[in-house]
Amino acid sequence: MPIAVGIAFRRVARSYWFDPAGYELKEWDKVIVETTRGQEMGTVRIPPREVTEEDLQAPLKPILRPATSEDLEQYRQNLYMAKEAMGICRDKIAKHGLPMKLVHCEYAFDRTQLTFYFVAENRVDFRELVRDLAATFRTRIQLLQIGPRDQAKMMGGIGPCGLTLCCSTFLKEFTPISMKMAKDQSLFLNPVKFSGVCGKLMCCLQYEHEMYKDARSRLPRIGDAVQTPRGEGRVNDLNILKEEVMVEFPNGTIVTYAASELQWERQVTGCACAAGAAEVVEEEPINDEEVPDTDAYL
């Protein structure tokens, strides 16, 4: 199996495999590599190790060199120049009257490319803007339209929980989030209540979703008829975490039982399911957008 090293190009981003080229590398070392965007400075996040061919997305490119003090100084200069470029680009966006909001800007390490990230409600014809920027900066210009979730990841912020956003702290990739995840967790079906600062459903809905699905598979549904030690009643409510069922009897009395104390049957896709059987439910359409990968360097 080939030896590869995992390199990340942002603080919170997925790693890409490169050939260590014989260099002794350890985690957090800075290195210079060749990418489709030109030379870039990356950080070793996975020390050299054997990797299966199936895990490699493309032929391994070699690391050019460990970063020197001169490389680190050039990287700091690039960050300063990118901040200046942000201001210039905003002025030119206003000059051209384009309905777009600039979010982030970055130079390739060798300054052969300057990339601007922006958000907009619709597609934007920015060809004239690109020509203007190319004439100003005398380098290759790339404008990338990103989604609200990528915008939140780049800008950071504080979530409704009072903590720093997951996407800007540790989430390396976005996964689709659906309304069904909220429904399975018995949350109020008001998207505003569990939407993040990006306006999309919160990524943390996925963290405990599998546990809730497993617990629900052992519980009846609200409205199902169940047999209890006191006779037949109907499910009024559920406590999923405790696996408890609130049963309402014909006289209006509501009693809480452990699910293990009950017997029930229900019709699912034309079949009668015994107590505790897993429910077969068709997945609801995803209520979110696929976010383009803005970290593609291979």
Image (spheres, helix red, strand yellow):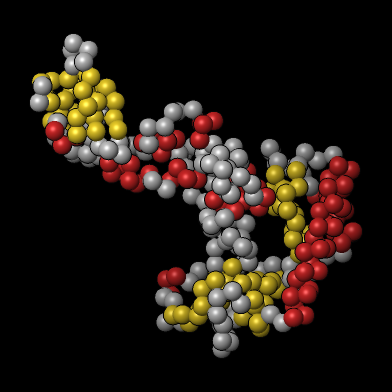
User: Considering the image in quadrants, where does the N terminus appear?
Assistant: bottom left
Depth order, front residue of 56/212:
212
Where residue 21 appears, as percent x and y from the top left, is 58, 86
Where residue 147 appears, as percent x and y from the top left, is 63, 45
On the rendered structure, is 132 left or right of 254?
Answer: right
On the rendered structure, is 142 left or right of 3?
Answer: right
Where residue 170 appears, as percent x and y from the top left, is 53, 57
Q: Is residue 270 visible?
A: no
Q: Is residue 199 visible?
A: yes
Depth order, front residue of 68/90:
68
Q: Which residue does the image show at 44% across and 76% down from the upper left?
A: 51
Depth order, front residue of 215/140:
215
On the rendered structure, is 171 left or right of 206?
Answer: right
Q: Which residue does the image show at 18% across and 38% down from the upper left?
A: 276
Depth order, front residue of 260/222:
260
Q: Decide: is 3 above or below 86.
A: below
